[in-house]
Amino acid sequence: MSKNNEEIFKNVISHAKEYGFVFQSSEIYDGLSAVYDYGQLGAELKNNIKTYWWKAMVQMNENIVGIDSAIFMHPKVWKASGHVDGFSDPMIDNKDSQKRYRADQLLEDKIEVYKTTGEIEKAGSLQTDMDDALKAEDLPRLKALIEEHKIACPVSKTCNWTDVRQFNLMFSTQFGAMAEGAEEVYLRPETAQGIFVNFLNVQKSGRMKIPFGIAQIGKAFRNEVIARQFIMRMREFEQMEMQFFVRPGTEMEWYKKWKETRLKWHLALGTDPAKYQFHDHAKLAHYANAAVDIEYEFPFGFKEVEGIHSRTDFDLTQHQEFSRKKMQYFDPEVNPETGKPYGNYVPYVIETSIGLDRFFLVTMMNAFEEQDLSTDEKQDSRSLLKLHPALAPYKAAVLPLTKKDGLPEKAREIMDALKLDFSMAYDEKDAIGKRYRRQDAIGTPYCITIDYDTLTDNTVTIRHRDSMEQERVAIADLGKIIGDLVSWKNLLG
Ligand code: ATP
C-alpha cells in the first residue's frame, strides 16, 4: 500500500470510530481480533444498505422471495455441503515469530510487490504457479514457491517456515446442556445452506415456479487464519445472498444476467465505474462451473466484494443424498424439442453473495472526502461523507439558530412532523457553522436552519451537504423536498 493510500485508509478507519460508525468489539478489554461492533450511525447505514439490497433483490422481483433462517443448523448440513472436509485455507507458520499466515496471501502480496516494482513478468509467472498449486491442492508446492521467492515473515524477517497445512475455518460449539451426549454444531460459515435446505419448503408454500430465487441477509462466521484490513476480513460478519434456481442447461444465461444486474446495483450509487472490475476465478470451488468476483479498488488494491457463482445442482443433490429427501422440482413447461414437459429435475443454481461489511467499507471509502476550503483570508477544511442520500444515516438535521426566543420550540415542531417519515437529527449546541460541519462529517444531505424569520413567515433555510448552497423554502414543502432526494426511486427506478 502506498503511503498516501495507507493514510486515506487510516483516516477512514478513525473517522468511522470518531463519529460512531464502527468500534472494535470489546474495546475496553483491548478488543477481540477481527470482530467489530457497529455504532449508532453505523447501524443506521448498515440497515439502509440492507434495505437497498432487499428492495433490489426481493421486492423488485416477483420471482424472488426472502427468508431468515437460523444460524445453527443440523451438523449433517455441513457434511453434505462439503464444508467439514473442504472448507479450509492453506496456512503456514513462521517458526521464529510464531505468526501464522495464509500461504496464498503471502504469495499474493509478493505478486503485488512485483507489480509495483515493475517486475511484471515475475508477477505473472508467480500468479500462474500459485493458481496451479492451489488448483491441484499441492501444499508442498505452495511452500516451495514461498521459499523460491524468498518471502520473509513481516515480523521476524526470516524465511524459517513450517510446512503448509490446511486449516478448517468453521467455528464449532456444543449443542445441548448435557456434557455427554452434547452434539457438536457449527456456526454457519455462509447463509446459503439455510436457503438450500428450505428450497422445497419455500417452493411449495410459495408456489414458486422456476426460475425463482430465495434471498437472505444474515450472520456468518469464519475462523479466518489471519484477519486484517479492518472490516474487510472479519471472523463474524454478515452476508446478503441470493440463490436463483433454474432449469439445467440455462444456467450460463442466468449467470451472465446476474453478473450484469449485480454490477449495476453497485454502480447505481454513483461510484466511478473505474473503481470496479470483474475477476474470473482461476480455481473453481468444488461446487461451481463458473465463478466471478466483483472487485472494488480499495487503497490496498482490487479486492472481492461480491461473488457470483454458478453452483450447478451440487448443493441440492448433496442434501438429497444426505437427507434422503427428494430435492426435485416438477417443471410442467413443454420442451419444444420433445413435445413433452421438462418434468422432474434437481434445479441448477446461480448464487449472488455479497459481504455486507465489505460493502459498508466500500460505501465509506467512496463517500469520505477531506476538503480544503481555505480562502485568502482564512484556512478552512471539512471532512465530508458524500453518502448517497438514500443510504445516509440521517436524512436531514434540524438546527435552531439560537437556543432561545422560541426557536427551539419551532424547530421541535418541524422535527416532530418530519421524523415520522425520515430518520432525523436535532442539534442546538455550538455555532451553526460547527453544526453544519458535524452533519457533513456523518453524511446528512440536508441541514434545516430555523431562524427569526421562520417565526413570522414559516420558511426555513435548507443547506445542501455537497455544494454547501443554501435556499429558502416553506416549512410545508420540507417533506416533499427531503422525500424526493432520499427516495429509493432514485436508485431503483
Ligand atoms: P475471500 O476470498 O476474500 O476470503 P471468499 O471467496 O471466501 O472471500 P465467499 O465465500 O464467496 O468469499 O463469500 C461471499 C462474500 O462474503 C465475499 O464476497 C465477501 O464480501 C464476504 N466475506 C467472505 N468472508 C468474509 C470475511 N471474513 N469478512 C467479511 N466479509 C467476508
Image (spheres, rainbow, N blue to C red):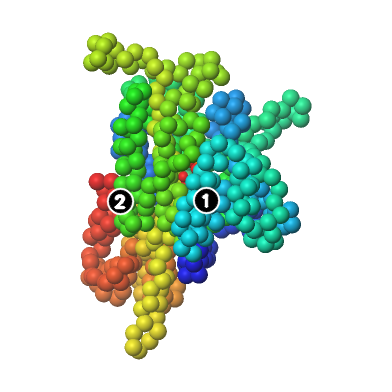
**What residue is pinned by disc 1?**
126
Q: Tell me the residue at 68%/56% (across/down).
A: 159
Q: Which mark is residue 268?
A: 2
Between 320 and 275, the one lying in front of the other is 275
Give above or below for 388 relative to 182: below
Q: Residue at x 27, y 57 (%)?
A: 485
Q: Residues within 10 Å of mark 1 (few under 14, many from 20)?
A: many
Q: Indicate which disc residue 94 carries.
A: none
Is 285 in front, or is 56? 285
Residue shown at 48% from the left, 30% from the top: 287
Residue 126 visible to the viewer: yes
Residue closest to the far bottom: 377
Amino acid type assigned to the residue bearing label 2 in the image: Ala
Task: Give the quadrant of residue 173.
Answer: top right
Q: CA distance from mark 1 to mark 2?
A: 36 Å
Q: Residue 449's x, y, as percent?
A: 32, 70
Apparent side of residue 459 relative to residue 27 in the rendered image (left or right): left
Count of numbered badges drawn on the protein: 2
Q: Is residue 182 left or right of residue 42?
A: right
In front here: 107 or 292? 107
Determine whether 151 is above or below 187 in the image. below
Residue 413 visible? The answer is no
**Is 465 displayed left or right of 186 in the figure?**
left
Depicted 427 relative to depicted 235: above or below: below
Q: Residue at x 56, y 25 (%)?
A: 80
Horizontal and vertical percent for residue 424?
A: 38, 59
